Amino acid sequence: MAAPLPDAATGAAVCAALRSQVEKLGLSIGDEPVWSDVTFSETTDPFSQEVSVIATWRGKARYGKATFFPDGRVFAEYQVLQPNPADAGQYVDYVQIWGRPEQLRGEAVMAEYAK
Protein backbone atom coordinates (compact mmCIF):
# COMPACT_ATOMS: atom_id res chain seq x y z
CA MET A 1 0.00 0.00 0.00
CA ALA A 2 1.38 3.41 -0.95
CA ALA A 3 1.96 5.86 1.86
CA PRO A 4 0.34 9.29 1.46
CA LEU A 5 2.68 12.11 0.47
CA PRO A 6 3.21 14.83 3.10
CA ASP A 7 1.15 17.96 2.47
CA ALA A 8 2.71 21.33 1.65
CA ALA A 9 2.17 22.67 5.20
CA THR A 10 4.06 19.74 6.71
CA GLY A 11 6.83 20.15 4.14
CA ALA A 12 7.08 23.87 4.87
CA ALA A 13 7.32 23.14 8.62
CA VAL A 14 10.17 20.68 8.04
CA CYS A 15 12.07 23.13 5.83
CA ALA A 16 11.60 25.97 8.34
CA ALA A 17 12.77 23.76 11.22
CA LEU A 18 15.94 22.78 9.32
CA ARG A 19 16.71 26.45 8.54
CA SER A 20 16.02 27.36 12.18
CA GLN A 21 18.66 24.89 13.40
CA VAL A 22 21.21 26.57 11.10
CA GLU A 23 20.16 30.06 12.23
CA LYS A 24 20.65 29.09 15.91
CA LEU A 25 24.36 28.80 15.05
CA GLY A 26 24.44 32.29 13.54
CA LEU A 27 24.71 30.86 10.02
CA SER A 28 22.45 30.94 6.98
CA ILE A 29 21.69 28.57 4.10
CA GLY A 30 19.40 31.10 2.43
CA ASP A 31 16.00 29.76 1.45
CA GLU A 32 17.21 26.15 1.34
CA PRO A 33 15.75 23.61 1.60
CA VAL A 34 12.84 24.31 -0.72
CA TRP A 35 9.91 21.90 -0.36
CA SER A 36 8.98 22.09 -4.05
CA ASP A 37 12.46 20.72 -4.94
CA VAL A 38 11.97 17.32 -3.27
CA THR A 39 11.62 14.00 -4.99
CA PHE A 40 9.67 11.25 -3.27
CA SER A 41 10.24 7.56 -2.79
CA GLU A 42 9.01 4.93 -0.36
CA THR A 43 10.75 2.50 1.94
CA THR A 44 9.32 -0.47 3.80
CA ASP A 45 10.48 -1.29 7.31
CA PRO A 46 11.66 -4.91 7.21
CA PHE A 47 10.32 -5.64 10.70
CA SER A 48 6.98 -3.81 10.88
CA GLN A 49 6.29 -3.76 7.12
CA GLU A 50 5.19 -0.12 7.54
CA VAL A 51 5.75 2.08 4.52
CA SER A 52 7.44 5.46 5.05
CA VAL A 53 7.79 8.30 2.56
CA ILE A 54 11.29 9.60 1.83
CA ALA A 55 11.65 13.18 0.55
CA THR A 56 15.07 13.92 -0.93
CA TRP A 57 16.77 17.17 -1.93
CA ARG A 58 19.67 16.70 -4.35
CA GLY A 59 21.25 18.30 -7.35
CA LYS A 60 22.05 21.69 -5.85
CA ALA A 61 24.75 22.86 -3.43
CA ARG A 62 23.48 20.68 -0.58
CA TYR A 63 21.88 17.28 -0.04
CA GLY A 64 19.09 16.45 2.38
CA LYS A 65 16.58 13.77 3.23
CA ALA A 66 13.39 13.60 5.29
CA THR A 67 11.62 10.42 6.38
CA PHE A 68 7.90 10.65 7.10
CA PHE A 69 6.82 7.68 9.22
CA PRO A 70 3.25 6.29 9.11
CA ASP A 71 2.55 7.41 12.71
CA GLY A 72 3.22 11.07 11.83
CA ARG A 73 6.81 11.35 13.06
CA VAL A 74 9.48 12.97 10.92
CA PHE A 75 13.27 12.67 10.85
CA ALA A 76 15.19 14.97 8.50
CA GLU A 77 18.75 16.05 7.89
CA TYR A 78 20.21 18.70 5.60
CA GLN A 79 23.81 19.57 4.78
CA VAL A 80 25.25 22.89 5.98
CA LEU A 81 28.97 22.53 5.18
CA GLN A 82 30.07 25.81 6.77
CA PRO A 83 32.73 26.67 9.36
CA ASN A 84 31.55 26.42 12.98
CA PRO A 85 31.52 30.02 14.26
CA ALA A 86 32.16 28.75 17.81
CA ASP A 87 35.15 26.50 17.00
CA ALA A 88 37.68 27.16 14.23
CA GLY A 89 38.69 23.48 14.20
CA GLN A 90 35.22 22.28 13.22
CA TYR A 91 32.63 22.76 10.55
CA VAL A 92 28.86 22.26 10.64
CA ASP A 93 28.35 19.09 8.64
CA TYR A 94 24.55 19.02 8.76
CA VAL A 95 21.50 19.76 10.88
CA GLN A 96 18.86 17.26 11.83
CA ILE A 97 15.33 17.51 13.16
CA TRP A 98 12.89 14.99 14.54
CA GLY A 99 9.46 14.70 16.08
CA ARG A 100 6.00 15.60 14.86
CA PRO A 101 5.52 18.59 12.51
CA GLU A 102 3.84 20.64 15.26
CA GLN A 103 6.73 20.08 17.69
CA LEU A 104 10.05 19.50 15.90
CA ARG A 105 13.32 19.45 17.82
CA GLY A 106 16.79 19.30 16.38
CA GLU A 107 20.52 19.82 16.58
CA ALA A 108 23.58 20.50 14.50
CA VAL A 109 26.18 17.84 13.80
CA MET A 110 29.76 19.06 13.76
CA ALA A 111 32.81 17.49 12.15
CA GLU A 112 36.53 18.08 12.63
CA TYR A 113 38.57 19.43 9.77
CA ALA A 114 40.97 16.79 8.39
CA LYS A 115 44.52 17.28 9.60
Image (cartoon, rainbow, N blue to C red):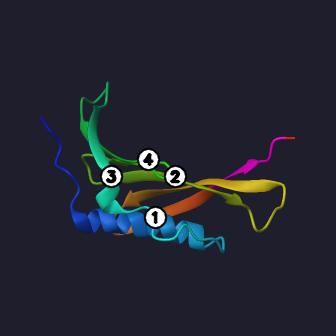
- Residue 45, position in %: x, y? 31, 30
State the residue in front, 8 or 34: 34
Callout 3: 10 Å neighbours few (<14), some, many (20+)?
some
Q: CA distance from mark 4 to mark 3?
A: 10 Å
**Mark in the foreground, 1 or 4:** 4
Q: Earlier in the sequence, mark 2 or mark 3?
A: 3
- Per the image, the residue denoted by label 1 is 32
Q: Dot 4: what SS?
A: loop
The type of residue carrying mark 1 is Glu
Residue picked out by circle 2: 62
* Residue that label 4 marks: 59
- Horizontal side, residue 106 vs residue 52: left or right: right
Total count of labels: 4
Residue 67: where, in percent of width, then height? 36, 46
Q: Which residues are magenta?
A: 109-114
Q: Residue at x 24, y 65 (%)?
A: 8
Q: Secondary structure at mark 1?
A: loop
Give the label on residue 38, or none. Answer: 3
Residue 112 is one of the magenta-drawn residues: yes
**Mark 2 vs 3: CB contact within 8 A:** no
Front-lying residue, 9 or 59: 59
